[in-house]
Image (spheres, grey):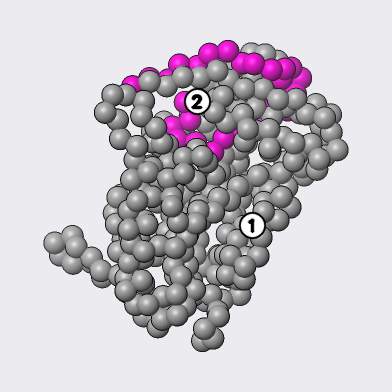
Amino acid sequence: MEANEITLFALSDSRSFGERVAGKLNISLSELEERDFADGEHKIRPLVNVRGRDVFVIQSLYSDMHRSVNDKLCRLLFFLSCLRDNSAARVTAVIPYLAYARKDRKTQPRDPVTSRYIAALVEAMGTDRVISMDVHNLVAYQNGFRCHSDHLEATPLFVDYFASLLHDKDKIAVMSPDTGGIKRARRFGEALARALDLQLSFAFMEKERAKGVLTIGQLVGDVRDSAVVIIDDLIASGGTLLGSVAACLEKGADKVYAAASHGLFVGAADKLFTGDELEQVIVTDTVPPFRLDHDLVRHKLVVLPASDLFADAIRRIHEGGSLLELLNR
């Protein structure tokens, strides 16, 4: 292999996503060995020479039926350090869904700021760069890492989808389910308005969470007779989303759609799909919707591939191109 080629690994937990990214790059995933031992320990090593190479490692950090978030994080950390020990020229961690990103500040006395600890662990392995998508708090993400931190947004994927779906609607509202997501919703709404050449309205929900208790307040904005798109970074149990949907319908919304970059779908998230309140739920494939009943969700759940976005970002980083152009396309 030429020294200037991309070397791309995907740990077994993210192999499917990695294969899609590799396909878009017209390369093959580089081989690695993962061995589990009887006492629960494990090792991971590359099976190709990485000396002097520009290496990218894909691992999305979510729990599944096989491994916890912490198990996946530990495997990623060990492999990143192993690549550095084997003289890789540059090591980039590609983390489509970044765990612990929601714990970005102290909300109780003596609280941890876990997102910053994750950054410190990744950096301690000798990682040169990190790529993730739609983290919960962009400022905390950028300030938490001292190495290069690149942030991708699913906005272009959602704009393309809704521009096609809602092209015949003359009244559309974009809504954030909380005040913290207002900037995200406005970026999406402005891009969708340009794509449709249509003036959109904006709305948001007042929401507070303390000690695990969620309090949903008033809906601010006009959604009457509108097709409403609720946009967020992730869907966990769906409690916040269901409250927002109910508020929209109470205020006279015509139809309500939900879009989130990461679909965790934990707890009672199936409730999102059992009624007629939501038209569709649109997510990306950074987290496979394995917790949901396929028969229950097949008519309402849409999964958009983020592999193109990550492949383009990897190519641009490798070639010294601009990520800003990618995000503003």
The location of residue 142, given as percent across then percent down, is 49, 46
Q: What residue does disc 2 label?
A: 240
Q: Is residue 246 visible?
A: no
Query: Which secondary structure, mark 1?
Result: helix
The location of residue 313, given as percent across then percent down, is 60, 61
In this orientation, which residue lies closer to the viewer: 45 or 257?
45
256 horizontally vs 208: left or right? right
Q: What residue does disc 1 label?
A: 323
Q: Which residues are magenta?
A: 211-240
Residue type at mark 2? Thr
Mark with earlier residue (2, 1): 2
The location of residue 124, given as percent across then percent down, is 32, 58
Residue 279 covered by magenta stretch:
no
Query: Which secondary structure, mark 2?
Result: helix
View extreme (front): residue = 146
306 horizontally vs 36: left or right? right
